[in-house]
Image: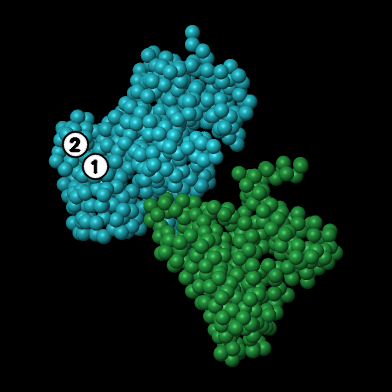
Chain colours: A cyan, B green
Amino acid sequence: MAKEILKVDGISKEFSGVRVLNKARLDIQQGEIFGIIGENGAGKSTLIKIISGIYKPTEGRILFEGNEVVKFTPQNARDMGISIIPQEFNLVDDLNIFENIFLGEEFSKKILLDKKRMIKRTDDLLSELHTTINPKDMIQNLSVAEKQMVEIAKALAFESKLLIMDEPTTVLTGEEIKVLFNIMRKLKESGVTIIYISHKLREVKEICDRVMILRDGEQIDVSSVEDLSEHDMATMMVGRELSQLFPDKLEAQNESVLEVENLTVPGVIEDVSFDLRKGEILGFAGLVGAGRTETAEALIGIRKKSRGRIKLNGKEVKIKNPIDSIEKGIAYLSEDRQGAGIITSFDMIKNITLSSLDKYSSGLINHKKERKQTEYYVDKFNINAASLKTELEFFSGGNQQKVSLAKSLDTDPEIFIVDEPTRGIDINAKREIFYFLNELASKGISCIFISSELEEIIGMCNRVVVMREGKLTGILENEEINEKEIMLHATGLKGVA
Amino acid sequence: MKLSKRLKGFSADKWGPLLALLVLFVISSFASPYFLKTRNLLNILRQVSYTGIIGLGMTFVIITGGIDLSVGSMTAWAGGISILVLNALGGGPWAIFVTILAAIGVGMASGAFNGIIITKGRVAPFIVTVGTMAIFRSLTLYISGAGEFRSQSNLFPEIGMGDFLGIPYPVWVFIGLAVLFWMILNHTKYGRYLCAIGSNEKVAKYSAINVDKIRFWAYSIVGMVVGVTSVLLAARLNSISSSGAGQSYELDAIAAVIIGGTSMSGGSGTIIGTVIGAIILGIVNNMLNMLGVSPYLQGTVKGLVIIAAVLIQRKKK
C-alpha cells in the first residue's frame, strides 16, 4: 500500500464573495501521476495555487505527508518539497538560463557564486530534456517552447516530492511531449508524485494514473483513467454531450487577396512565398522554431524584412509597422497572449477597443459606443466575466483569449492571422473559436491559421503551408492534408527548401 | 484601528489620498487657529499651483513608466528666456501675451528635446533628464551671468499678483489645466494610449499604437506646463533668479504625483490624485511654517510624507 503524500480535505476558495472552488477532496498517493482536468474557470488553477501556497483557502485543510499545512506561502510549499511549473512563465528575461534556474537558490563556493557547478547542472538538465539550448542563453532570446523547457528544468533542478505541472505541453510539439513524458515516468519510478493539469485528454489518458474532473468549482469525479474514455472525460468536464469539434470546411474562392513573394528576414526566414485566397483558411504547420510566427510578424511589420514583396488584392503594399498593417486590413492575434495580445491590468472594454479606438473617438472617446460593442462581443463569444469593468488578470485563459480575439477583430480585418489561437484553452472555448473562424471565412474574410496542433490544422484548413527552419517546404492541398504528409515536410524528409 | 479596517472597505487606491487630505485638514485646523483663515487657505492653493501644474504633466510621464527630472531647471530656463522676450518687446499687454507664448514654446521645445532623445536615442528617461537638468540650469546661469532676469514691465507683476473673484490667477490656471488633463487622460485616445504603453509596451506596439509618438508628446506636454509655471512664477516675482528659480520643483512635482496614488511603474494614475497630492504637500509646508519648525527640517518631513505614501500604497498590494 503506497503512502499518502497529499490530502486535500474540503478545500474551498472565494474571491470577493464568489466561490470558485467548492469543497474539493483529494488523496494523492506517493509516486502517482494525478491528472486534474476541467474547463477554463473550473477551479483547477485555484486548487493548485492553494497547494503550492500562492492562495490561502477560504475553508478546509491540506495535509502534506500527514502534517497539516498551516502557512500558505510559496516559500513554505517549496521547503516542504512542492514545486510547480506554472502555466504562465515566471522567468526573468534579462538573465540567462542557468541564472534563472538557480534564482534565489544559487550554488556558492564560500562567498562567490559557483557558476561552473550551476552551468554543469543546468546543462545536464537540459540535455536530459533533449533540448539544444545553452545554459548561457538569455531568456529573452528563447522561443516559447524553449522557455517552457527551462521552466521544466527549473522545477527538476530541486529535488521535489510533489511536482505540479500546469498545462506544460500547450506550447510543445509531439516530439518534445514524448521526451517530457519519459522524464515524468522516470520521476515516478524514483518516487516523485506529479499533479498534471491539461486540456489534452489524450495526454491525460496516456500519462496519468488517476484523474480528477472539476466543473464550475465542483468536484465531479475522481477515477482511475482506465475506467474513463476520453469521451467520458470530455462529457463530464462540459456537463453535456459534446458535439462535433470542427465545423464543415467551406470552399475558398479563387481570387487571391494576399500574395507574398520571397519574404526574407535575415537569419529567421528565407524566401517564403505563398498566396492566400478570399475566404480561405490557410494553415501554417511546422515544428516550433520553423519560422511561422516570424513570417506573420514580418507580414505585419514587427520584423524588418530584407527582401520580399507583399501584394494585397493585386497591388503591392508597404507595411512597416502594425499601424500600417491594421490600416491595410491585416490583423494579427499573437501566440503570446499576455505578452503581446492583451493588457491584463485593463478591463475588457479598454482591451477590445485598443487597436480600433479611432472608431470610437472624435476628439473624445464615446464610452457608450465602446461599451455597446464590448457587450456585443461578450454575447457573440460567450465571454464569461464578472463585469465589463473587471481587469483581465482575473479572467481565465479561455476568456482572455476571446477578448484578445475580439480586440483583433474589432479592427475589421480582411485578413486575419491567428497564431496558436487555442493555446491553453479548454475544449468548449476551442470549439467556439473554430466555428467562429469558419463563420469569418464564410463572410469572405481570409485567415492564416498558425498552429502546432496537427489535428486543428487538418480539421480546419483549406490548404496548409509547411515550414522548416525558416523555409517553406510545401503547400499541401486536399488529401495531402494529413498527419503523415505534414510531418514529412515539417521534419525535412520531404519537400526541397 | 477601527478606521483602518473601515478604510479597507473602500477602494483604497481611489480614496486613500482624499482621506489623507481630509485628516490632515482637520488636524491642521486644530493645530493652528490661523489655518482656516481664507487668506491662509488661498495662500496655500497659490503656492501649490506652481509645482502642481508641473505635476499634471508629470502624471502623464510617470504613467508611461518614465520620469522627468529636468522640470526644475527648465522652469528657470523658460522663465529666464520669457523675461528677455518681455523686456525686448517693451512690457506692454501685447508683449506679455507674446511672453506667455514664448515661455510655453521654450518649455515645449525643451521637453521635445528630452522626448526625442528618449524615444529616438533609446536612452533611459532618468539619464536623459538628469543630463538636461544640468544643461538647462547651466544655460540659464550663463545667459544671466549667474544673476537675475529682471522684468522692466509694470504690468507683468500685476498679473502675477492678481486674482479673479478673489482667487489668485495661478490657482485658476491650475484648476483649468487639471480639468483639461483629466479630460485628456480619461476621455481621449491619447490618455488611453498613455496607460497602455505604461502597462505593457509590447502589447501597445502590437496593437498599432505609435509608442514613440505618444511618449514624445508626454515629455513635450510636461515642457508646456513647465512653460506655464515659469511665466506665472516670473510674473509673481517680476524676475527669475538663475540659480534659485525652480529649485527642487522636480521633487515637489514627482512627490505630488506619487502621493496622489500614481504608480511609479506606470500604467495607471489619476489627475485628481495629483491635485490632492500637491495640496497635501502644501498644507504640510504651511503647518510646519506656522508651528515654527525650522525650515531646514521641512525637507525631512516632506521626505517622510513621500516615503509613507509609497509604503501605504505598497501595503495595499
The picture places residue B143, in percent across and down from the top left corner, at 56, 82
Say the numbered circle drawn on residue A469.
Answer: 1
User: Which amino acid, by three-letter code, is at mark 1?
Assistant: Glu
Which picture quadrant has residue B255?
bottom right
Q: Residue at x 57, y 54 (%)?
A: B264
Q: Residue at image x 56%, y 75%? A: B138
User: Which quadrant, please, contains the C terminus of chain A?
Assistant: top left
Q: Is A221 situated above or below A405?
A: above
Left or right of residue B211: residue A270: left
- Nearest to N terminus: mark 2 or mark 1: 1
Res A492 label: 2
Residue A285 falls in which quadrant of the image? Answer: top left
Q: Position of residue A141 (x, y in %)?
A: 37, 45
The chain that hosts pointer 2 is A
Looking at the rendered structure, which numbered label has been put on residue A439? none
Residue B204 to residue A9: above or below: below
Question: Chain ID for label 1?
Answer: A
Q: Amino acid at mark 2?
A: Gly
Q: Are marks 2 and 1 in contact (CB under 8 Å)?
A: yes
x 64%, y 88%: residue: B153
Q: Are marks 2 and 1 on the same chain?
A: yes
> Could you say where residue B254 lies in the image, as x and y percent from the top left?
61, 61
Distance Cα–Cα, label 2 vs label 1? 9 Å
